[in-house]
Image (cartoon, rainbow, N blue to C red):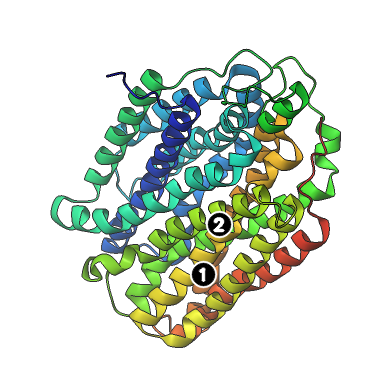
Amino acid sequence: MKRMKIPKRYVIVLLTFICTNVCYIERVGFSIAYTVAADAINVNQANKGLILSMFYYGYVLSQIPGGWAAQRLGGRRVLLLSFLLWSLICGLIPLDPNRVVILVLSRLFVGVAQGFIFPAIHTVLAQWVPPQERSRSVSLTTSGMYLGAAGGMLFFPSLVKHMGPQYVFFVEAVLGVAWSVIWLKFSSEPPRTDLPKVAMPKVASREKIKALAGGVVAPRTVKIPWRKIIFSLPVWAIVVNNFTFHYALYVIMNWLPTYFELALKLSLQDMGSSKMLPYFNMFIFSNIGGVVADHLITKRILSVTKTRKLLNTIGFVVAAVALMALPSFGTPSGTVICSSVSLGFLALGRAGFAVNHMDVAPKFAGIVMGVSNTAGTLAGIVGVGLTGNILEAAKASNMDLTSSETWKTVFFVPAYLCIFSSVIFLIFSTGEKIFE
């Protein structure tokens, strides 16, 4: 019997899904391991916020260079090099909260290395994936982030409890190297033609084939239209929503463990599988959003523009309501439900803004993603650091950090940003190609 041949683009999408999975295992793992190690020596909340946010300082530096490098050198090569670099750092750096300089530099360089990953992924997907598969392909790829976060939340607290925080770094390094080997073996450069390797009807005209394929990046020698990108209102609509999405995600990812321990008197080790539900919910809703978006577009129920706006608005508005409700419950179950709803619907919203890079600029998707993700990374710097300062200011004002009321500002800020961003996307976004 002949072996069934899996289309190459499916292999590429699966590998990028695993890629984002491993990246977020690393991020969640560090947050958990460092929080335990820092709490053991009574590091204050502002200093914890500084260390936790250093990753994003490095990450923001390499977003636009990552898009440029992927455009010029190829996304496959950039992904491999960035993965090997951050894996090596994780494997060699000791986790000691007293060695602040080493921790700051290591998190900075891990951030720089991982900053190349998502622009490179979008370049690769733009080369391989045709328009009618974009929403679900991008949604599946990015849902790896949430499954990785869920797995990290489930597995790492027990690992830290029984083996110690340092073992988290070892596991992350092994996973990173393993993915690099798999990527090197099973991935390949895109075809050197005007079309990706997508099966097309034999009777299709050349124009129809180009329209269906569509996911082609510009040749590496083409001049990048930086001015048009920077001054494009649809691009800024993507940028604003990327900022808000990551502000909410990073604040919850980095500070929800502290909220559970201080306000709810519950450690992650004692929560069982419920601690992974918010991120598992993101995995489910991200893929639902991708499938729904592609269905609405391919069946011509809605235009690309209306589809992106609809899913983005639903996702961000519902997430805002859940974030504002979160501190009102004051119970572990209520917190898990609200954080699951907020993160789940934010992930649904990615079928709006996060796929829009390839709608408006299919030939420069990595570049636009780099610009957009720069804003998303700034959200990590601002959100994680600001939250630490908000809590320290509350403590200085003799407010009780063990009261959920004190945490309202922490969750209300991203909620208001969600509402604002959804309005911006409704007004300025488009699903039409604006960069040739």
Q: Residue 244, position in %: x, y?
A: 63, 60
Looking at the image, tell me whether mark 2 or mark 1 is earlier in sequence order.
Answer: 2
Q: Residues within 10 Å of mark 2 (few under 14, many from 20)?
A: many
Name the residue type under label 2: Gly
Left or right: where 186 falls relative to 431: left
Name the residue type under label 1: Ser
Secondary-structure class at tag 2? helix
Secondary-structure class at tag 1? helix
Task: Please indicate, yes or no, whether residue 398 appears anywhere in the rendered image.
Answer: no
The residue at which mark 2 appears reads as 289
Task: Please indicate, yes or no, whether residue 346 appears anywhere in the rendered image.
Answer: yes
Of badges 2 and 1, nearer the viewer stands 2
Q: Residue 116, position in %: x, y?
A: 55, 32
Rendered image quadrant of residue 382: bottom right
Q: Residue 2, position in %: x, y?
A: 31, 18
Q: Residue at x 50, y 57 (%)?
A: 288
Rendered image quadrant of residue 40: bottom left
User: 165 or 396, which lies in front?
Assistant: 165
